[in-house]
Amino acid sequence: MPGRIISFQTLFKNPSSPFIIALTNPQLPIAQPPNPMPNQLIECIPNFSEARRPEVIDQIVAAIESVSDVKLLDRSSDLDHNRTVLTLAGSPAGVEEAAFRAIKTASELIDLNHHTGEHPRIGATDVCPFVPLSGATMDECVAIARRLGERVGNELSIPVYLYEAAATRPERVNLENIRRGQYEGLKSEIESDPNRAPDFGPARLGKAGATVIGARNPLIAFNVYLTTDDVDIAKKIARAVRHSSGGFRHVKGLGLLVEGRAQVSMNLTNFRETPVARVVEFVRREAQRYGVAVHHTELVGLIPQEALVDAAVWYTQLDQFDSEQILESRLFDAPASNGTENGPSFIEELAAPTPTPGGGSAAAYAGAMGAGLVAMVAGLTIGKKKYAEVEAEMQAIRVMAESLRKELTQAVDDDAASFEVLLATFKLPKDTDEQKDARNAAILTATLNAAHIPLHVAEDVVKVMELALKCAQDGNVNAISDAMSGFALSRAALTAAGYNVKININSLEDKSAGEKLLEELADLEKKATKLEKEIRHVMKERGGI
């Protein structure tokens, strides 16, 4: 199972997000956000047989993010396993559609005939489970799994097997039974063995292999690395801990060699009945039998907060612990201290008679809006038969535009913060020569930083202009004016950011320190002029305006 350690801090990176609240503390009442979350919330965790080509995963992610009422929560890849796990959540209809688009994209980009990796697999999209979270039932997830399975089988000609709660045969409840022999074994048996006939789709394998779709309760993918490279020890421990060979009731396990270290790779299918701490301690004791120890553990994807809290309580031996003693829980439940639901908007802050936010922040904000429009046009192109030839390009554009939008949104605050720092340097003491030198050095550093941020904004918005041009050239013609609007906003952002770079450099006593920044800005402005000429030509030829 591919791994990336998720810290408690990462899990609560945006604690106000309704998705995070619902995932990590579903018992808490959720205040109504500006854009209310769906009444029903379902999680989907598709696993893809690819990690060594990030550009492929980028396109799969773009396919998911092209569905409006779905949020991508996590992306976790492992090179040794050559496997990526994505976690998304949203409305039932949104999650179902996003899963189909992801499976379709993966089938076009991943060839199982050329795939190698440590993790067992039978398909490009190897497994795709649905999990009920808020206001949803297991029966609804089963219905989604079966509808999706039928659609994938019919439209994509991919064999589909249903598992866990959606299984149509008792022997297919367990994923291991379906994945027996992996892609190569299934390929040789699917056409001749009636026991291996799929639930949906043809009884033959193409390059995308087969896909396993199902419904289940929340699962924790958890790996334990040992202080040895002897994979036989990991296999013996996995045999002892997993339920199928006499271990814990809700644990599945494999012994693998990952990054030169023996790994016990596990899925915990019911953390309430078989807690994480109990499993870790069992593995630790088993390892000691063979003269080795636990080197470190690893979490794959996301974990419910309750599971982490249970482990912390167990290890610290907290007596009479109450979940209300968790700071975040109390904060989520507390009303806003200022008595208002939302603070002032960015536009209101911009209009206030304060030094920040100012022109640099406004430039970044305009660029973020431009990137948002580009992402919108790409999204309106994806999934349209008329634009099938450019779908992959539009998916990539959407990913890049979203990344730029996030960077530019962050730059709104970064620019304001850099100016605050610059103002603070002018207040430094200057009574002695030493203090004067330190103050001058601090002013120079802060000024250059205040120039670097709008320059980076300028670099980003030129990239947005390039994407806007591609959308105008090849994207949905019904949204061509939106592509031009995104370009125009980005062009304005470049002009505003450029003036902020120049004013900061001009304030330096030794302007040579900023010459390189001005040269980079000039190159960006030349490039923007060329792009503007091209997009105006496209608007005339393709848009008629």
Image (spheres, rainbow, N blue to C red):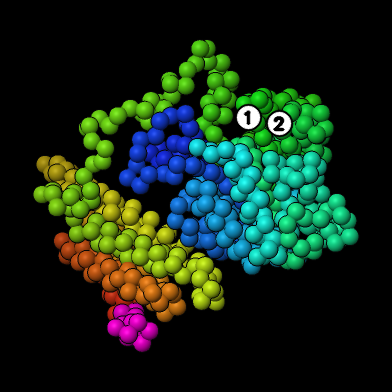
Q: Which residues fall within the magenta stretch?
A: 531-545
Count the numbered circles shown.
Answer: 2
Q: In the rendered image, which residue does mark 1 sit on?
A: 271
The residue shown at (50%, 42%) is 41
Residue type at mark 1: give it: Phe
- Tell me the CA gap for discs 2 and 1: 8 Å
Residue under the image location 38 percent in, 25 percent down: 330
Q: Residue at x 87, y 55 (%)?
A: 194
**Residue 293, position in %: x, y?**
71, 30
Asked whether the beta carbons under mark 2 and mark 1 sit within 8 Å of each other, the answer is yes
| For residue 44, side relative to residue 470 (left or right) | right
Label 1 sits on a secondary structure element that is loop
Q: Look at the image and tell me whether residue 159 can be seen.
A: yes
Q: Residues within 10 Å of mark 2 (few under 14, many from 20)?
A: some
Residue 345 bears which disc, if any? none
Residue of label 2: 250
In the picture, the quarter occupied by the C terminus is: bottom left
